[in-house]
Image (cartoon, helix red, strand yellow):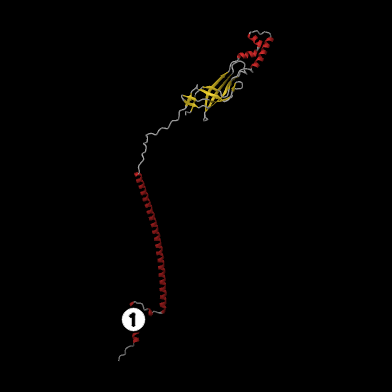
Amino acid sequence: MIKHPSNSSVLFISAALATFALAGCGGSPNPATVAPADTAAGQVEAAQADTAKAEAARLEAERAAELSAKEKELADREYAVKQQELEQELAKRDAELAAAKTAQASAAAPRKATPARTATAPAKAAPPAPIVVPAGTPLAIALSANVNTKKAVVGDAVQGHLSSDVVVNGKRAVAAGATVNGSVTKVVSGSNKIGGVPMVSLAFSQLVLANGKSIPITGTFVQEGVSETGKDTAKIVGGAAAGAIIGHQVSSKNGAIVGGVLGGAAGTAAAQKTGGEVKLTAGSVITVTTGASFQVDGG
């Protein structure tokens, strides 16, 4: 009688055969059959691998986030630039549209008639020509102070003003009131000189207009008094001495000649205090004739 193997034996043999078969085929043994030490090392390696994968994943996520932020910033900048360009373009269009509307309104508005321009502008009025006062023009001068041959001295200043306008060819050259300056040039006093005619001579050299402008002029005035030569002679010799001289009746004796001379000297002293004078009072108007022409501004 043939004896069959037990179930446990069959299972052992089957496991052995399976192990050999897997080894021959290059398979890995079942984890249930691995030794405890090998299982712990594998778990450590697996944990390290998982950590490395997690770190790599974290770095990749950070890089992705940074790249996304940069892309967003760049996109925002591009959007801002495009927005600014768009606003400028809109503003330009608005300005052009407003200018076009203004031009249309101006064209539609009625235009005011403008006076025609003359071919040439009117010439400016030329300044008035100066007026020449010719030589020989009379000047009526009212004296400002007294002039008396008894007190006057050559060189004394004389002043007056025009008592009337100076008119040339119907135009007023100098208005009345202009100041005239001059001086005494010659004096003959009847009180200080025996015989001759008392006289005074004045020379005017300057005309001062109302605006203060000074104009040089030339003009003289001479006033003579009454001759008192006969009276002076009678005063000098006096009485019988005068008759003796006139009738040539003077004796040749020294006494008579000396007496006649002494009498004459005494008569001279008396005559010097009793002669005539020329008196020009303040305010009196004298006429002075210009010796040369002078020019004033026209007006």
Q: Quadrant of residue 205?
A: top right
Query: In x, y percent, where is residue 69?
Result: 40, 62
Tag 1: residue type? Ala
Which of these two is toward me, 72 or 100? 100
Can the viewer see residue 154? no
Q: Residue furthest front?
A: 283
Which of these two is toward me, 45 or 136? 136
Query: In x, y percent, where is residue 78?
Result: 38, 57
Q: Residue furthest left?
A: 1
Can the viewer see residue 22? yes
Label 1 neighbour load within 10 Å: few <14, some 14-19, many 20+:
few
Identify the residue at image location x=40%, y=77%.
39
Which of these two is toward me, 108 or 37? 108
> In the shown orientation, is residue 203 left or right of residue 266?
left
> In the shown orientation, is residue 50 left or right of residue 229?
left
Query: In x, y percent, where is residue 184?
Result: 58, 23
Name the residue beneath numbered marker 1.
18
> In the shown orientation, is residue 274 left or right of residue 134?
right
Identify the residue at image location x=38%, y=55%.
83
Q: Quadrant of residue 261?
A: top right
Q: Is residue 249 above or below residue 39?
A: above
Identify the residue at image location x=65%, y=16%.
270
Q: Quadrant of the N terminus?
A: bottom left
Query: In x, y percent, where is residue 8?
Result: 35, 86
Q: Quick one: SS at disc 1?
A: helix
Q: Residue furthest right?
A: 255
Q: Is residue 183 above or below residue 9?
A: above
Identify the residue at image location x=41%, y=75%.
43
> In the shown orientation, is residue 76 left or right of residue 145?
left
